């Protein structure tokens, strides 16, 4: 995404937020960062008077918070994180540092000091890059601070006490939450609002950009330093290459950033013979003679009109394993790719160029090569390979969606039209055809592996000693759970036909306790005992009768206090967002996507209460609920 491109650099790293602050978690989650939360145990007791300036105190505290977590995770032989982020927010007024109030009286003391005055809010941030050399933790620390000025109105004693009794001030620096009721006390804010809330997101992104895209020597004057650069801007700039011809569009146009997202529209700023992008948007018309009105074209609609061509280009390039060849042998010319794959040269060249246009490949004078994202997501052995799901989309979903019109007219699945067989018969193929079974499992594995970290860390699951992932297929989530909770015993329960084919998908090095695989049918057989059951991408696929059988069985084996973790895309209450879920519904399975309140209601029906939601903003959301204690 063009707005938060530098965060894409963290996508393949294990990122830990060393903070218990729900606001910091929310700010970072909202921009799509994938991270685990490990609150720091560092006590905020540094001697304030030993610091020359208040921000130095905030930075040092942030650093100590992050270091404590990095050391603890390293010592505990959890996988050492790649990046640990710590933060500390303080308020200063009249040269005094205010932190979180210890009690209501303290909150009153703070707020009455702030009344009618301007004060400063400083957040110190530490970004620690960790590595493990031998048994030693090595760290590289980057830190910074941000200051925001806030002015309070004159506040009466009565209003202050009313605010304090709301309970809001207690866990907040300076005793107020600007994002909630505390916002009513504020006359003005000068600077970054999110800095006051607890995390200076803009400055953080700039720091990451500095770290991951250090500006090269010759091109710096073209970059607008106070804007967050797009990945393309900095990748292009840091290539340090001047193109030899006077072309207006850089060859890396529309390249995927490493989060796999594509900047919405490439923007270029040409000077002399070099092609250097600025960090801000210039209408296309200003650059290449296209009239201003072109910019007003309904670009979203045009994109949708072409969307199917783009999908199919991705599917075919994946199916022909072009990304695999390019990873191993690239850069390659079209003719070499055609020879490897056994395709026509002209057709291959067109497809490769289309992949460049879509940001999946790069093209230079040496030939075509993969982008970082293609290596990670599109090759069949990539770290977070989606290859299996892409092939499933091509071979299974594409034919179904080709018959969408009939599906909508008839309100039913179109397997008979797409595959010449009824859905039930088709399902039997999974049992009989090894190829189809492997394809389906590869597709499930792709998504499970990609989402495993988010799901495993969506809630603190350390209280559960035994977990059973029902329909857990290849065990991708199970392996992640054991990495994160080394004391947890995890069982995957799935059909015998599935369990018989898992070996290909197991991690090459087993550095944790093994996952146990148990064969069975969760609609018919006894379920293994566990404190926590998981249903990931199961409920949306089945009709109500089947769900009734499954949830009744889980409820019956769950002891009070045991829990059920459901992983699905949770719809908003209007049931129109997010689009992924709504579009998925169009395949007209007998199951359905549900909103948060629908999941809550469904789970309550089977004795699960205290339902908590974690909307991850990524591929799957998490819903955790607990089996009700028996009434006395
Ligand atoms: O307007 C707002 N101002 C401040 C906050 C919240 O206040 C706290 C600041 O405390 P600290 O930096 O020590 O962070 P903790 O919450 O203790 O978490 P750590 O585990 O990171 O130490 C912070 O939560 C801000 O979000 C606010 O919400 N609004």
Image (cartoon, rainbow, N blue to C red):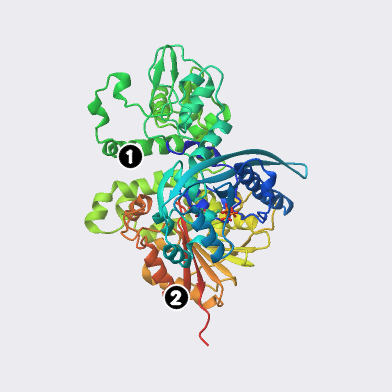
Percent position of residue 124, x then y: 58, 44
Percent position of residue 408, x then y: 24, 54
- SS of the residue at dot 1? helix
Residue bearing the label numbered 2? 606
Residue 513 in view, yes or no? yes
Percent position of residue 399, x then y: 34, 47
**Could you say which is closer to the camera, residue 490 or residue 594?**
594
Q: Is residue 292 above or below residue 136?
A: above
Residue bearing the label numbered 1? 308
Q: Label 1 crowding class (10 Å Cα cut-off): few <14, some 14-19, many 20+?
A: few
Q: Label 2 crowding class (10 Å Cα cut-off): few <14, some 14-19, many 20+?
A: some
Could you tell me how many numbered marks the image carries? 2
**Residue closest to the far bottom:** 632
Q: Is residue 247 above or below residue 72?
A: above
- SS of the residue at dot 2? loop
**Could you say which is closer to the camera, residue 330 or residue 621?**
621
In screen coordinates, is 359 left or right of 51?
A: left
Q: Is the CB of the residue bearing disc 1 within 8 angstroms of ligand 1?
A: no
Does the residue at mark 1 contact the one at mark 2 (Cβ under 8 Å)?
no
In screen coordinates, is 616 left or right of 508?
A: left
Image quadrant, ligand 1: bottom right
Quarter holding the N terminus is: top left
Give the number of the mark in front: 1 or 2: 2
Q: Is the CB of the residue bearing disc 2 within 8 angstroms of ligand 1?
A: no
**Could you say which is closer to the camera, residue 103 or residue 620?**
103
The residue located at (34%, 51%) in the rendering is: 583
Q: Is residue 427 above or below residue 606?
A: above
The residue located at (38%, 59%) in the rendering is: 425
């Amino acid at each position: 995404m063009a707005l938060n491109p530098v965060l894409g650099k963290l996508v393949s790293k294990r990122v830990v937020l060393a903070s218990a602050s729900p606001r910091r978690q929310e700010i970072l989650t909202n921009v799509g960062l994938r991270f685990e939360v490990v609150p720091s145990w560092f006590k905020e007791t540094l001697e304030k008077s030993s610091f020359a300036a208040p921000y130095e105190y905030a930075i040092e505290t942030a650093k100590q918070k992050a270091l404590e977590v990095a050391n603890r995770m390293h010592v505990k032989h959890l996988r050492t994180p790649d990046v640990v982020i710590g933060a500390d927010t303080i308020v200063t007024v009249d040269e005094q540092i205010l932190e979180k109030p210890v009690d209501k009286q303290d909150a009153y003391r703070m707020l009455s000091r702030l009344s009618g005055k301007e004060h400063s809010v400083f957040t110190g941030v530490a970004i620690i890059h960790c590595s493990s050399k031998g048994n030693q933790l090595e760290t590289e620390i980057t830190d910074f601070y941000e200051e925001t000025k806030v002015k309070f109105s004159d506040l009466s004693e009565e209003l202050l006490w009313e605010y304090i009794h709301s309970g809001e001030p207690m866990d907040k620096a300076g005793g107020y939450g600007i994002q909630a009721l505390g916002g009513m006390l504020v006359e003005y804010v000068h600077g970054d609002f999110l800095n006051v809330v607890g995390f200076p997101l803009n400055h953080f992104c700039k720091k990451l950009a500095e770290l991951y895209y250090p500006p090269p020597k010759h091109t710096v004057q073209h970059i607008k330093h106070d804007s967050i650069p797009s990945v393309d801007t900095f990748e292009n700039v840091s290539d340090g290459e001047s193109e030899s011809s006077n072309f207006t569009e850089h060859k890396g146009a529309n390249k995927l950033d490493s989060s796999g997202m594509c900047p919405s529209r490439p923007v270029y700023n040409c000077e002399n013979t070099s092609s250097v992008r600025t960090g801000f948007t210039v209408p296309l018309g200003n650059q290449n003679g296209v009239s201003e009105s072109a910019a007003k074209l309904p670009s979203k609609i045009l994109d949708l009109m072409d969307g199917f061509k783009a999908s199919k280009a991705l599917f075919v390039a994946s199916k022909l394993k072009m990304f695999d060849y390019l990873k191993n042998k690239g850069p390659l010319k079209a003719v070499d790719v055609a020879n490897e794959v056994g395709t026509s040269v002209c057709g291959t060249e067109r497809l490769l160029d289309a992949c460049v246009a879509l940001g999946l490949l790069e093209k230079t004078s040496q030939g075509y090569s993969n982008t970082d994202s293609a290596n990670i997501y599109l090759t069949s052995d990539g770290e977070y390979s989606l290859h299996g799901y892409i092939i499933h989309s091509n071979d299974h979903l594409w034919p179904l969606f080709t018959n969408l019109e009939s599906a909508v007219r008839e309100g039913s699945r179109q397997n008979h039209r797409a595959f010449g067989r009824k859905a039930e018969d088709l399902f039997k193929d999974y049992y009989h055809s090894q190829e189809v079974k492997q394809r389906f499992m590869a597709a499930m594995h792709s998504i499970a592996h990609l989402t495993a970290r988010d799901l495993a860390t969506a809630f603190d699951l350390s209280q559960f000693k035994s977990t059973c992932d029902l329909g857990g297929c290849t065990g991708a989530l199970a392996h992640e759970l054991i990495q994160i909770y080394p004391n947890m015993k995890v069982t995957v329960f799935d059909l015998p036909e599935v369990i018989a084919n898992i070996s290909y998908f197991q991690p090459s090095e087993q550095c944790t306790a093994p996952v146990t695989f148990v064969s069975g049918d969760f609609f018919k057989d006894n379920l293994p005992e566990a404190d926590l059951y998981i249903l990931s991408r199961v409920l949306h696929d089945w009709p109500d009768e089947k769900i009734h059988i499954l949830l009744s069985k889980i409820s019956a084996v769950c002891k009070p206090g045991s829990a059920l973790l459901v992983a699905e895309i949770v719809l908003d209450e209007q049931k129109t967002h997010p689009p992924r879920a709504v579009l998925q519904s169009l395949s007209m399975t007998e199951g359905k996507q549900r909103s948060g309140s629908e999941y809550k209601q469904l789970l309550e029906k089977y004795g699960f209460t205290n339902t908590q939601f974690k909307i991850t903003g990524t591929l799957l959301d998490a819903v955790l609920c607990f089996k009700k204690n028996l009434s006395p």
